[in-house]
Image: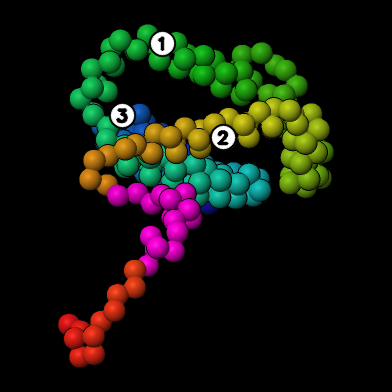
Amino acid sequence: MILQALAFYVFAAITVASAAMVVTSRNPVYSVLFLILAFFNAAALFLLIGAEFIAMILVIVYVGAVAVLFLFVVMMLDINLTELREGFLEYFPVGALIGAVLFAELLLGVGIIGSGSTTVAALNAHGPHVAAIDNTRAIGRVLYTQYFYLFQVAGLVLLVAMIGAIVLTLRSRPGVRRQRAGEQINRTKEQAISVVKVPTRGGV
């Protein structure tokens, strides 16, 4: 029990520190790397509470796909860090408002504000009944019944994000040769090959 509590505090501290570095880091590549570190430690926290399915999904989907996609997009885009820092004070009130709303949602989810049936404190009261059900089966029942439409909307959001990342990276740059599949498929035999008659012993 002491070892589990120690592991919780270690993983939680690293997660909070990584999340802070994501926001405060000046280099976007470092921010994405710290985000990946935060995902790994959050997955370890899920393993400690017995939610192995959520932990594996967090590693496979978010670390293996989303975070790596962010990293590739950040590395491929020519981001001017000076211009990004210039608009910090302009958007600070909006960012502070969004942060306050997210903090209030966290307090509501934990149970400090309000005492609904979906708070963490209320769920802990039904611990024996929750532990009797396999978490993968329970998530599947809730996700594909009660939250089915929200699940489909989340898939559409990820699709839009993927298309946006592709559009941002497909920029015409001078001096860069790109493959044009349409022209390669439609070319004729005369354009593809050229037959040259070389006399005997006249080759290079």
Q: Nearer the viewer, residue 4 or 72?
A: 72
Q: Nearer the viewer, residue 177 or 59?
A: 177
Instruction: Give the CA separation, mark 2 to mark 1.
Output: 24 Å
Image coordinates of residue 161 in percent, x first then y, are 51, 33
Question: In the image, what residue type sits under mark 3?
Answer: Thr
Question: In the image, what residue type sits under mark 2?
Answer: Leu
Question: Which residue is located at x 56 percent, y 34 percent?
Answer: 158
Tag on residue 126?
A: none
Among numbered discs 3 and 2, the one appearing first in the sequence: 3
Instruction: Give the CA separation, mark 3 to mark 2.
Output: 26 Å
Q: Residue furthest bottom?
A: 201
| Number of disc labels | 3
Q: Is residue 189 magenta?
A: yes
Graded by Cα atoms within 10 Å as few (under 14), some (14 to 19) or many (20 or more), the crowding at tag 1 reads: few
Image coordinates of residue 68 in percent, x first then y, are 43, 46
Graded by Cα atoms within 10 Å as few (under 14), some (14 to 19) or many (20 or more), the crowding at tag 2 reads: few
Magenta stretch bounds: 177-193
Question: In the image, what residue type sits under mark 1?
Answer: Val
Among numbered discs 1 and 3, the one appearing first in the sequence: 3
Q: Nearer the viewer, mark 3 or mark 2?
A: 2
Instruction: Give the CA separation, mark 1 to mark 3.
Output: 17 Å
Question: Which residue is located at x 75 percent, y 21 percent?
Answer: 117
Q: Quadrant of residue 129?
A: top right
Instruction: Say what secondary structure mark 3 lies in.
Output: helix
Residue linked to disc 2: 158
Question: Which residue is located at x 52 percent, y 43 percent?
Answer: 62
Residue linked to disc 1: 94
Tag on residue 24?
A: 3
Is residue 184 positioned above or below 85 on the image? below
Graded by Cα atoms within 10 Å as few (under 14), some (14 to 19) or many (20 or more), the crowding at tag 3 reads: few
Instruction: Say what secondary structure mark 1 lies in.
Output: helix
Image coordinates of residue 34 in percent, x first then y, are 37, 41
